[in-house]
Amino acid sequence: MLVLLLNGLYAVGQLLGVGFRVMPVAALLGLAAWALYTLAFVAVFRAMDLLDQHPPAGYVLAFAWGGLAAPHLAMPANHAIQSLAAKFVSPEFAAVWGPALAGPITEEFVKLAGVMLLILTARNQFRTELSVLIVGAMTGLGFQVVENLNYTLRSAMNFPSESQVLPVLGDLLTRGLLSGLWTHAAFTAVASYGLALFLFRRDRTRAQRVGMAVLCFALAWAMHFVWNSPWMEDWFSDDLAGLALLLLAKGLPVLLAVALIWRAATLETGAYLHATAASLVPERDLLRDDEWLRLGSPLARWRVRRDVGRAYGRRARRLKARLQRHQLRLVLKAGMFGRGPRTARHERAIRRLRARLDAIFPDVDCLCR
């Protein structure tokens, strides 16, 4: 894994080196734009308490695999498949359909391979379906960001005018805002859900679990195929509005499928957290009844933080957020290791934060119920 990551890092470094030599402004703006784009995704994941499923190193490795190793492995395979399409059908066919034929096969496989490697490396860290999905989403996000940076630099080099800003803004609009919610992060999350079903649906036979994993991979492949294909391009005009409508027509079904999968994974994760907390964290000063009920709902916990912030200000919201995160980490670690030294830090933090909230905002818990 380390060798593949280093090879990918070298390839990305070469790309950036060429970009800074030829188009320094575009390279700098593109790097900054896609870095901020990544941070926006991470902020959303953090706000929904999704990043508490694993240590930070797990997400760094997932993002690095998606952004460094996966493109390095997929690129030669993509070229080979498109060359075969040109040879056995025609160059025109390969130019139009090559991305749809090559990308879904190679890219979905190598991204999912990274998720599988991380699961094999730290199997004990993966206790819920959501823990697999968020790693898949981070892997896909890494691929998405590096691919977008690559396209940004190439479009800047081939831009018809001398502007180094317009191609960056154009790619950020089309590849970021209009495409960001339903491309690689979504595809890999769908494929990773198959792995989650294989790992955790022990009530099913092995053949059924393998079938569910294959079905999810096939769904991710089909989404990617349709996204890369020229289908529906004739339905819309060639201007920016037509492009936006085309991307929405292709992307909204993907977003709907991902939302349904995330909903199912959240329900499974909630059931696991409730059962774990009931058996291993019975103390009501650590986890009150209303907090126990919201363990399985990231959106419900976010609403509580929002209401606390509106009523008592940012300080109270930050304290409530820290309290919730320590509670979630306590339950997750108790499920992995049992109660002991690994959970004691979170127990102390919960009691300390609870005391601070009660002292500064005595009726804050009434608001949360």
Image (cartoon, helix red, strand yellow):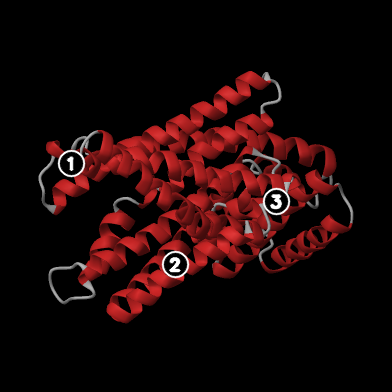
Nearer the observer: mark 3 or 1; the answer is 1
Q: Give the class, few, some or many, for how many residues have Cα within 10 Å of label 3's Cα (few <14, many ≥20).
A: many
Q: Which mark is residue 328?
A: 3
Percent coordinates x, y for residue 80 in the rendering: 37, 45
Which of the two labelled residues, at mark 2 and mark 1, occupies the earlier sequence position? Answer: 2
Q: Residue at x 50, y 31 (%)?
A: 216
| Count of picture labels | 3
Q: Which mark is residue 58?
A: none
Percent coordinates x, y for residue 67 in the rendering: 48, 58
**Residue 287 seen by the camera:** no
Residue furthest toward the front?
A: 87
Q: Is residue 329 above or below residue 96?
A: below
Q: Which residue is mark 1?
A: 92
Q: Is residue 32 above or below residue 230?
A: below
Q: Secondary structure at mark 1?
A: helix
Q: Which mark is residue 12?
A: 2
Percent coordinates x, y for residue 196 in the rendering: 61, 35
Q: Secondary structure at mark 3?
A: helix
Q: Residue at x 13, y 73 (%)?
A: 161
Work out how far the residue at label 3 is from the one at label 1, CA to CA, in angstroms.
54 Å
Task: Indicate left or right for 313 with 322 as reference.
Answer: left
Amino acid residing under circle 2: Val
Which quarter shows the N terminus? Answer: bottom right
Of residues 87 and 297, the one nearer the viewer is 87
Q: Secondary structure at mark 2?
A: helix
